[in-house]
Amino acid sequence: MKITFMGAGSTVFARNVIGDCMCTESLRDSVFALYDIDAGRLEESRVILEAMRKAKGGYGKIECYCGVENRKEALKGAKFVVNAIQVGGYEPCTVIDFEVPKKYGLRQTIGDTLGIGGIMRTLRTAPVMMDFARDMQEVCPDALFLNYVNPMAMLTGYILRYSSIKTVGLCHSVQVCSEHLLRMVGLEDKLEGRKELIAGINHMAWLLEIKDKDGNDLYPEIKKRVQSKIDSPDFCDKVRFDYIRNFGYYCTESSEHNAEYNMFYIKEKYPEMISKYNIPLDEYPRRCIAQIEAWKKEYQEMLESGVKEHNRSHEYASRIMEAVVTNNPYQIGGNVLNKGGLISNLPEEACVEVPCLVNGSGVHPCSVGSLPVQCAAMNMTNINVQLLTIEAVKTQKKEHIYQAAMLDPHTGSELDIDTIKKMVDELIEAHGDYLPKYI
């Protein structure tokens, strides 16, 4: 069996996902095909994973494929394809995504999912992923494509709508959502045996139900504890707790992400909101710099001391593969098209995050009915941007990029239409050959 990892130069993530496979009896004897366009980073991943493979008993085989000319060979015959690419990297593209909007007074925290940063990341990433899909249709048409790349809803939705490749989008925020909430409010004793229901869109899926092992609803007690957390100066999850206070439900992704998915918190006219809600502006560039430095140090330590023991992580990828291979069912929170109205009050062409059952015949999304109207409304403010950005990718018309940015909650609440268009034009020019030509 062949498992191909696209963007294997993302060494830490490749180590975690492929390491998980090496910890799994039904997967460990696979051929692990590593693909990247950066030879140096690909070699670092090969060194680490080869050492890990030997430490885990020597099962399987590592193969490396560098450059676009070798992409089809990397994909050929794969049963599973894991996608973790970052088109344009931290430099120059992430820097551009943050620095150009700043000139226009538009500030961001993460910029990888929504907002002008998420729009631009989609525009440069979607064409590359469609190239992957075309190659897969030719050399591994039955493979399951596991997408980990952000913006999750836009990219997964684009591939699902415009290719025939079996695809599911994966994000680890679902797995940790309810545990994080219960720990934050001091209800750790309710973790064991808890029951939950999560549905919505990626990074804004709602914890619709949270019950203890006996079926008792935990939300009433959670809501009693929300205000004290919001009032605490050092508490760093205030945006999501404010969601509970104003919309009634907690959501999956962190407050630093959600601070920029709406028009409420990052506002030039209300600068005090930044400190009140502990919003870390420019957080993603800081993380990138820290991760780059941390990896250099970690890689050197591994060369000197050997690989660290790897235990299977909470990432979905290996568990999905195991469920497909063994036909032992497993439930995930997956990103899929809303076909058939899985969430009945969101559009069918939207990419939604819902419970999915995985077994020997693949990934099977589950219908969850309608969201509370206020939660669906919040999701729609994001879905509008997602659908318009996908339309821009498909048509290559600049007007749809303008419209996506105009309707983005944060961008539209801070800038006027002419300024938004000027900013978009400058971003397109700055990204140069990383983007196709828009008319």
Image (cartoon, helix red, strand yellow):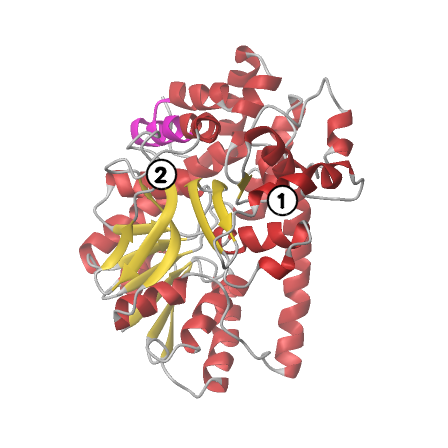
Mark 1 closeness class: few <14, some 14–19, many ≥20 residues within 10 Å: many
Q: Is residue 215 above or below residue 156?
A: below
Q: Which of the image's four quarters has the C terminus?
A: top left
Number of the label disc, if any, that sits on residue 222: 1
Decide whether the magenta segment is chiefly helix, strand or loop: helix
Within 10 Å of disc 2 (Cα), the crowding (few <14, some 14-19, many 20+) is: many
Residue linked to disc 2:
351
Kindly state the secondary structure of the residue where label 2 is placed: strand
State the residue in front, 36 or 358: 358
Q: Nearer the viewer, mark 1 or mark 2?
A: 1
Q: Quadrant of residue 248?
A: top right
Q: Residue at x 56, y 27 (%)?
A: 262
What is the C-alpha distance between the residues marked 1 and 2?
Answer: 29 Å
Q: Secondary structure at mark 1?
A: helix
Type of amino acid under label 2 = Cys
For the record, the magenta segment spans: 386-397
Q: Residue at x 35, y 22 (%)?
A: 397
| Image coords of residue 425 (percent x, y) | 50, 22
Residue occupying image coordinates x 60% and y 44%: 254
Q: Is residue 265 left or right of residue 312?
A: right
* Pointer 1 with pointer 2, Cβ within 8 A: no
Q: Position of residue 62 (x, y in %)?
A: 39, 76
Query: Could you tell which of marks 1 and 2 lies nearer the N-terminus?
Result: 1
Task: State the quadrant of the N terminus.
Answer: bottom left
Please tell me whether residue 162 is drawn above or below residue 384 in the rendered image: below
Three-letter amino acid code at the position of disc 1: Ile
Q: Position of residue 2 (x, y in %)?
A: 29, 70
